[in-house]
Amino acid sequence: MGGDFMKIIFEIFLSIFKIGAFTFGGGYVIVTLMKKKFVDELNWMTEEEMLNFTAIAQSSPGAVAVNASILVGYRAAGIPGALISILGTSLPPLIILSVISFFYAAFRSNAVVSEVLKGMQAGAAVLIAETAVDMCRTVWKERTLLFDLMIPGIFAACFIGKWNAALVLILCAGLCMLRAWLRREKAEVTVAEVKTGERGEQ
């Protein structure tokens, strides 16, 4: 492996390790910071790719943060990048939770720690909201009626109707597959009409 490749591997590990060590609030918060690092700062992937990775990470078994980091690492440096991403994502919570569990008895009754955690919850909520806004903005760039209606519809189904998240994802995937099939059929008909017209002119 060349020196440039090792620099990329080290950059992946260091970036994901720092993000994991200083991020509170779950997978979507980490996804936001990974987007800022790998899309906005390093330009290793596009915003659309990051959005796709987030969708795949959410739809796959396991923690969203780990799934997303694996995809980002693989996109940047193949299988070695994916493996080092797992290590970089897993080490910070492992170390922090080990320390917390050791001192849990002292932490749970400490008023200062309790207030700090409440502050972290508020900050995490804002970061998750920012992720949602960024993802919606990217989807709305498509300028299609289906996507424009899908976002509020999904929100209503999950928040008001209390639908199962897995069912919502399956329905959305089915709608998008149907849309892709209809667009392909339309394209094939258009191509056939063009060919027929060319033969008629000849």
Image (tube, rainbow, N blue to C red):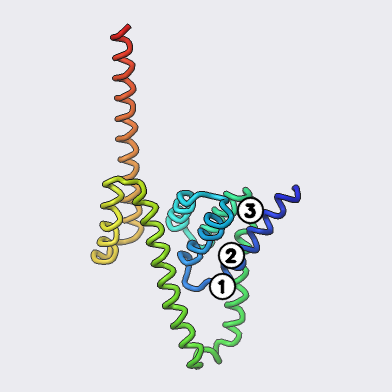
Relative to 58, is 199 above or below?
above
Crowdedness near tag 1: few (<14), some (14–19) or many (≥20) residues, C-alpha within 10 Å: few
Q: Position of residue 90 (x, y in %)?
A: 59, 66
Nearer mark to the viewer, of 2 and 1: 1
The residue carrying mark 3 is: 81
**Coordinates of residue 115 in the picture (x, y in percent):** 46, 87
Position in image of residue 2 (x %, y %): 75, 48
Distance between mark 2 and mark 1 Cα atoms = 11 Å
Quadrant for residue 132, please give it: bottom left
Please report contact status of discs 3 and 1: CB closer than 8 Å, yes or no.
no
Kindly identify the residue that appears in the image at 62 percent across and 75 percent down.
95
Helix, strand or loop at label 3? It is helix
Could you tell me which secondary element the residue under label 2 belongs to? helix
- Do the residues under discs 3 and 2 have CB atoms within 8 angstroms? no
Amino acid at circle 3 = Gly
Identified by mark 1, the residue type is Phe
Sequence order check, earlier mark of 2 and 1: 1
Residue hosting label 1: 22
Q: Is 144 or 82 nearer to us in this picture?
A: 144
Seen at 44% across and 58% down, the residue is 58
Judging depth in this view, the residue of 90 and 34 nearest the camera is: 34
Q: What residue is at 57 percent from the left and 67 percent from the top?
A: 19
Report the residue marked by disc 2: 89
